[in-house]
């Protein structure tokens, strides 16, 4: 991702979806720019569809209603196709069907599922397991804990621990297959699937010649080039009091301070640390800007789990990635940014 397109800061603000688009800033003085007539012919279109348990919002500029409808249909068809592959709550999804068989031996899987699993493996290695898609047994225990208002039992945590760990997933790139080292492994792609889906939707739209695109995947954003006559897509970061203009990148936020439960006077986030199996007890909010939605999505979760200083050092090892981390420390807000985060 190049930030040459970010001509001023992006104000990324979150209610429950962490990133929302604002009205786009207009700038005068460009009437003589080459190609103005072509840009004037573009019309703004917006479409919505609920998929993967959240609302996807699609905003783009196209030359005609006919092209816009073709693009809408193609992009959402691709999204539906990916949900059928990646969903962990649909009984008929490829992921759900693969899980019980992968403990018995290698299972050949689709290119989409393999791409997501391979990316998750790469991020697990680079983050030291802070992003771990096998964490689902722990997540299920904490869902019950929130409902019942009591901590998971030591016995249930110990049993779940036997089935958690990214090293338990074996990928064979030559065969395009997956295998589990132990039975009972469960995969949760929630921290990476939306980002991958938004990336794929953008590819579909660009193949139709539509490049001025914003995809809002439940608050995580995938952005094409800027709208006509504008510096970028104007978005808002929660807690910021200034505007950012972003283009040709992705932005994702993970919030450990919004969804939580209190048990015996202790606050536990819905985000679970794979290393401990415990819901995060610190309040933090992480925003990541990256070249792809899948990378931004996965790193936002990983940086929520890691200590802030370690997370920011990790960010610097990725090309074109920057991050902002907000911690609540002793009732005070602490804001940390990687060096290349927009000032």
Image (spheres, grey):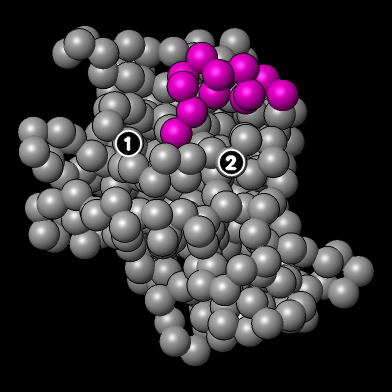
Q: CA distance from mark 1 to mark 2?
A: 15 Å
- Residue ID for mark 2: 129
Q: Quadrant of residue 193?
A: bottom right
Closer to the camera, 33 or 281?
A: 281
In the rendered image, the vertical position of residue 262 relative to residue 320, given as above or below? below
**x, y percentage for residue 123?**
66, 43
Q: Residues within 10 Å of mark 2 (few under 14, many from 20)?
A: many
Local SS, label 2: loop
What's the magenta region? 305-317
Is tag 1's residue or tag 2's residue first in the polypeptide sequence?
Answer: 2
Q: Quadrant of residue 244?
A: top left
Q: What's the residue at 40%, 54% (across, down)?
A: 158
* Magenta portion: prevailing SS class: helix
> Does residue 325 appear to the left or right of 86 in the view shown?
left
Q: How many marks?
A: 2
> Does residue 10 appear to the left or right of 259 in the view shown?
right
Closer to the camera, 92 or 319?
A: 92
In the rendered image, the vertical position of residue 293 relative to residue 343, given as above or below? below
**x, y percentage for residue 169?**
67, 62
Specify the quadrant that holds the N terminus: top right
- Residue ID for mark 1: 280
Residue sitting farthest toward the bottom: 92
Say if the magenta span includes residue 236.
no
In the rendered image, the vertical position of residue 126 relative to residue 310, given as above or below? below
Residue sitting farthest toward the right: 174
Local SS, label 1: loop
């Amino acid at each position: 991702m190049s930030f040459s397109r970010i001509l001023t800061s992006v104000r990324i603000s979150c209610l429950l979806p962490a990133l929302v688009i604002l009205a786009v800033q207009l700038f005068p003085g460009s009437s003589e720019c080459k190609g103005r007539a072509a840009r004037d012919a573009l019309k703004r279109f917006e479409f919505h569809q609920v998929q993967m348990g959240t609302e996807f919002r699609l905003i783009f500029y196209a030359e005609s209603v006919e092209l816009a409808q073709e693009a809408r249909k193609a992009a959402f068809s691709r999204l539906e196709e990916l949900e059928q592959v990646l969903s962990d709550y649909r009984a008929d999804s490829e992921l759900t069907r693969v899980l019980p068989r992968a403990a018995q031996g290698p299972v050949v899987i689709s290119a989409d599922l393999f791409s997501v699993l391979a990316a998750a493996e790469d991020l697990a290695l680079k983050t030291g397991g802070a992003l771990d898609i096998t964490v689902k047994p722990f997540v299920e225990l904490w869902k019950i804990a929130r409902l019942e208002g009591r901590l998971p039992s030591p016995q249930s945590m110990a049993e779940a621990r036997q089935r958690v760990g990214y090293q338990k997933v074996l990928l064979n790139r030559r065969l395009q297959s997956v295998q589990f080292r132990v039975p009972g492994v469960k995969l949760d792609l929630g921290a990476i699937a939306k980002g991958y889906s938004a990336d794929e939707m953008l590819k579909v739209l660009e193949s139709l010649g539509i490049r001025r695109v914003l995809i809002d995947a439940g608050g995580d954003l995938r952005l094409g080039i800027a709208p006509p006559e504008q510096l970028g897509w104007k978005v808002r970061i929660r807690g910021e009091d200034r505007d950012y203009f972003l283009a040709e990148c992705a932005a994702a936020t993970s919030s450990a301070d919004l969804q939580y439960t209190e048990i015996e006077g202790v606050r536990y986030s819905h985000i679970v640390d794979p290393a401990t199996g415990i819901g995060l007890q610190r309040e933090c909010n992480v925003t990541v800007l990256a070249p792809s939605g899948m990378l931004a999505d996965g790193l936002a979760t990983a940086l929520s789990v890691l200590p802030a200083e370690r997370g920011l050092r990790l960010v610097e090892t990725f090309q074109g990635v920057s991050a902002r981390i907000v911690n609540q420390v002793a009732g005070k807000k602490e804001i940390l940014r990687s060096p290349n985060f927009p000032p």
